Image: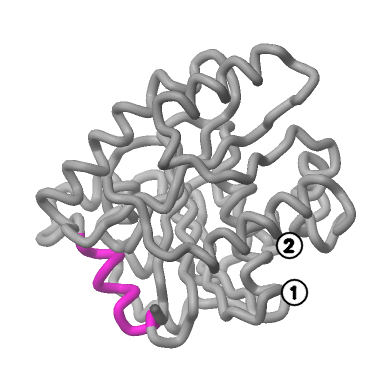
Amino acid sequence: MKGKTICVANQKGGVGKTTTAINLGTSLALHNKKILIIDIDPQANAGSGIGINKESDLENIYHALVLERNITSIIRQTGVPNLFIVSSSRDLAGAEIELVGMTQREYRLRKSLEAVKPDFDFIIIDCPPSLGLLTINSLVASDSVLIPLQCEYYALEGLSDLLNTVKLVKTRLNPDLMLEGILLTMFDKRNNLCHQVSSEIMEHFSTKVFEVIIPRNVRLAECPSHGKPIFYYDKQSAGSKSYIELAQHVLGMKGNINV
């Protein structure tokens, strides 16, 4: 499928959404796929995580989503071969309010991406930590949703809310939306709680969980401050190897998981 669109979503912050969007995108690009990352989080960390200045005056996703600029002119090449980005900015923080009164408000990102989907093998959307209109736009624009889930005590608390939102979007707005999978992140093998939480998640959602688990990794935590994906910061690290494996899972799946 040309232009397969995957949104990386979880309303809980700090679970590895941006880390996953950047490093899955990079890992897919390393497999000679042309990738576009859409940063729809007002924190704009996806751009800075791959060396894009978030204070830049250039147009960003806000201009496409709210002001209906042609997204083609907003796409920027990164320092990673085959990897492109539409960056975000703080302007997006007010977009939820601006979108409320607009017609077809849930479909604005989908409409914007239509022109560029044929140009890319994958489009990856980095969602904000909320279930507001920005995330709804992302789900409506996507073919599938990937859910990073931190291996901690509260991990399951918001998962049911998110899965219910995905089901509602599938029922009312995007009947083709699938679940790409649940990705366990920040796993510390020395921590018994991590093992307990991952076991519980596997018990409840076994067919929906990726086999690969993203470890809690110092090098993975360091690389955003250097503006580099983990492969270009330390390709021998456990974090780099895990995201390469995740890309292989995404590329090799026979079919997606029904919501």
**Secondary structure beneath disc 2?**
loop
Q: Residue at x 30, y 68 (%)?
A: 67
Q: Residue at x 82, y 43 (%)?
A: 222
Of 26 and 39, which appears nearest the observer? 26
Q: Can you say whether 74 is above or below 171 in the image?
A: below
Look at the magenta stretch and give its main secondary structure: helix
Q: Is residue 224 visible?
A: yes
Local crowd size for mark 2, using a 10 Å CA cut-off: few (<14), some (14–19), many (≥20): some
Give the x, y percent position of residue 142.
33, 61
Give the x, y percent position of residue 223.
80, 49
Q: CA distance from mark 1 to mark 2?
A: 8 Å
Q: Can you say whether 73 is above or below 35 in the image?
A: below
Label annotation for residue 79: 1
The residue wearing badge 2 is 51
In magenta segment, residue 2? no
Of 220 and 103, which appears nearest the observer? 220
Q: Which segment is the magenta one?
A: 107-117
Residue 188's image quarter? top right
